[in-house]
Image (cartoon, rainbow, N blue to C red):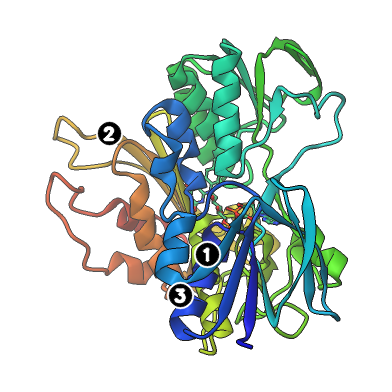
Amino acid sequence: MPERLVVIGGDAAGMAAASQARRLNPNLDIVDLERGTRTSYSACGIPYLVAGDVASPDDLVARTPEEFRREHRIDVRMRHEAMAVDLDARTVEVRSLDHDRTFRLGFDQLMFGTGARPIRPALPGIDGAQVRGVQTLDDGCHLLTQAKEMGCRDVVVVGAGYIGLEMAEAFHRWGARVVLVEAAERPMSRTLDPDMADRVVGQIHRLGIEARFGVGVEGFEAGVVHTAAGPVRADLVVLGLGVAPESTLAEQAGLTLGTRGSISVDRRQAASAPGVWSAGDCAETYNRVSQRRMHVALGTVANKTGRVAGVNIGGGYATFPGVVGTAITKVCGTEVSRTGLSTDEAERAGFQVVSATVETTTVAGYLPNAEPMTAKAIAEKGTGRLLGFQIVGGAGAAKRIDTAATAITAEMTVMDVVELDLAYAPPFSSVWDPVQVAARAVVRQV
Ligand SMILES: Cc1cc2nc3c(=O)[nH]c(=O)nc-3n(C[C@H](O)[C@H](O)[C@H](O)COP(=O)(O)OP(=O)(O)OC[C@H]3O[C@@H](n4cnc5c(N)ncnc54)[C@H](O)[C@@H]3O)c2cc1C
């Protein structure tokens, strides 16, 4: 009998692991269990599906179950949910959702790629049919179908993190009247420093999205969201309150959990029991700057950690060095990105910080397409080590964060960044790249 790998979850982390394991070990019997209807989809594309930029959910699928079966010999079982794991017996209890049948599947190695689930606080009416979270492509499709069938006019988005903002913009462009409700005083409050987050607010209002900051939600009823500032009409409510790792199954099986309930893993993505692995949104990761364990729910990390798990499962050797905290989004024409630590995160990690915020332009300021861009650099006092970087600006601004992410990974100082030989011509940049302009401003304070 060949060795069997059972993978739970059929998206980024699960299928990256399964594909890598197959590449390294052609003899492995690989079974993937996915309770939804699609594999290897881009959840990141859901806002663009809702907004109408993407014609069909199928366009967001990188590889179908048939392709995995045919090209990788992975036995993908759709609409099959893992209900329980017995680590001693080395079996998974599986429910076939379409046939109302339960059976046991033995494994030699087991991979948890179960992802995350939207946070649903215990508020009255939160389980109402009109209150939806968004995590999987199936969630995105249900949301759109529901909106169309109900002829939605009024959509309330709760939470102004990046998913909330992207969904608010998507429904606005879809044609709904959108109200964004956020308990914090500003959007992206866990991602950006307050001075940078304030720059996003104006853009949200300018587009015609009504945003209520500093307002908590108290409950939901059909057609209405009750907030601390009064009721808001809502045909549909989209939750953007962040996600929690989907680790219930792993916890019940007795695996060790870490930050925010994510599955504890080592550098090779091995969980706390032999032959058990985890990656993606359900697994814990490591921040290379703060040197602390953390939970990150991003597709970039899910693909990389899934690959590392797969290499190790297949008999190879790979490690995941951790993240520096890079993220990017676009809100109503304004690009936003960050990497490293925010000022607050850096201080909580024990650094004494200096920072500078500079106003610059996306391309040479004299060109007609130049748009304003704000860049903030955060460095360690004394050493000048670059700890964090944030950008808010027009078209072409945010992806410059990759320069800062690379510099932080290499543990460069702001003095090193100033000396980098970066590309310049007027249609691309000012003669001093905006990342270097911000770095120079910090050098004076180090
Ligand atoms: C609206 C939105 C926008 C996003 N935008 C970005 C972006 O721009 N950039 C970025 O980097 N990231 C983005 N993300 C995050 C990114 O999509 C996730 O980090 C990534 O999908 C995580 O992959 P995963 O495989 O770990 O988990 P998931 O994609 O959540 O997949 C887990 C799968 O496991 C299945 N599953 C769970 N439990 C079981 C079980 N018991 N049995 C069987 N199957 C099970 C689920 O059905 C699901 O299909 C976005 C997410 C959303 C929702």
Q: Amino acid at mark 1?
A: Met
Identify the disc placed on residue 371: 2
Compared to 287, does 366 lie above or below?
above
Q: SS class of the residue under badge 1?
A: helix
Q: SS class of the residue under badge 2?
A: loop
Identify the disc placed on residue 152: none
Q: Is residue 65 left or right of residue 181?
A: left
Residue occupied by mark 1:
15
Q: Tell which circle, 3 or 2, labels the residue nearer the N-terminal end.
A: 2
Q: CA–CA distance between discs 1 and 3?
A: 32 Å
Q: Considering the image in quadrants, where does the N terminus appear?
A: bottom right
Q: Amino acid at mark 3?
A: Glu
> Residue 321: percent from the left, percent from the top?
54, 77
* Residue 387 appears in view: no
Q: CA–CA distance between discs 2 and 1?
A: 40 Å
Depth check: 99 or 139 in front? 99
Q: Are marks 1 and 3 in contact (CB under 8 Å)?
A: no
Q: Tell which circle, 1 or 3, labels the residue nearer the N-terminal end.
A: 1
> Residue 340: percent from the left, percent from the top?
52, 61
Residue in view at x 55 percent, y 55 percent = 298
Q: Is mark 1 within 8 Å of ligand 1?
A: yes
Q: Is residue 357 left or right of residue 99?
A: left
Identify the disc placed on residue 411: 3
